[in-house]
Amino acid sequence: MMNMPDDISFLKYSSPAHIQIEVKGELDKRLSDYLGGLEIAWRTDRNKIKISRLEGEITDQTSLMGVLNALYDMRFPIINVIVKQ
């Protein structure tokens, strides 16, 4: 079950936000521009599985959906999406 932030009043359909997305697999850092300019970093979980983290600012919900759809099209399983103010 996902934890809901205490205050989501900042979140609007057309407002910018800071996001973090984690996917299973190792994304090439050269894909950053294609994925909305988000910074890409990696880690390995306890089972030695590579996890890629995309982090940065997006302009609106449409941009977020574009990134998520691109990850889906590239067949990277999405683990987590966090939207922050």
Image: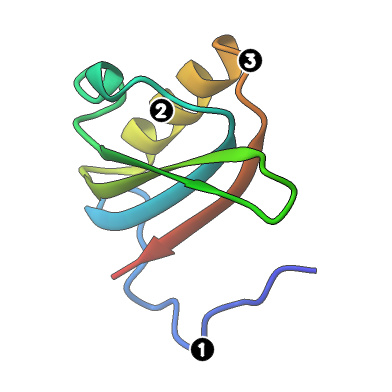
Distance from Cα at disc 1 to Cα at disc 3 = 32 Å
For the residue marked with disc 2, what is the amino acid?
Val
For the residue marked with disc 3, what is the amino acid?
Arg
Q: Are marks 1 and 3 in contact (CB under 8 Å)?
A: no
At which x and y percent is residue 74? 55, 11
Say which residue label 2 marks: 67
Distance from Cα at disc 2 to Cα at disc 3 = 12 Å
Q: Which of pointers 2 and 3 lies earlier in the amino acid sequence?
A: 2
At which x and y percent is residue 24? 62, 35
* 32 sits to left or right of 13: left
Q: Are marks 2 and 3 in contact (CB under 8 Å)?
A: no
* 12 sits to left or right of 16: right
- Residue lying at 52% horizontally and 45% vertically, measured from the top left: 22
Category of crowding for the residue at label 3, using alpha-carbon neighbours closer than 10 angstroms: few (below 14), some (14–19), many (at least 20): few
Which label sits on residue 75? 3
Q: Which of pointers 1 and 3 lies earlier in the amino acid sequence?
A: 1
Category of crowding for the residue at label 1, using alpha-carbon neighbours closer than 10 angstroms: few (below 14), some (14–19), many (at least 20): few
Category of crowding for the residue at label 2, using alpha-carbon neighbours closer than 10 angstroms: few (below 14), some (14–19), many (at least 20): many
Say which residue label 1 marks: 6
Tell me the quarter of the picture where residue 66 sits.
top left
Q: In the current view of this chain or complex, which residue is farthest to the right?
A: 1
Query: Depth check: 40 or 57 in front?
Result: 40
Give the foreground label among 2 and 3.
Answer: 3
Q: Secondary structure at mark 1?
A: loop
**Colour logic:** rainbow
Give the foreground label among 2 and 1.
Answer: 2
- Residue lying at 40% horizontally and 53% vertically, measured from the top left: 20
Query: Depth check: 69 or 45 in front?
Result: 45
- Residue lying at 57% horizontally and 10% vertically, measured from the top left: 73
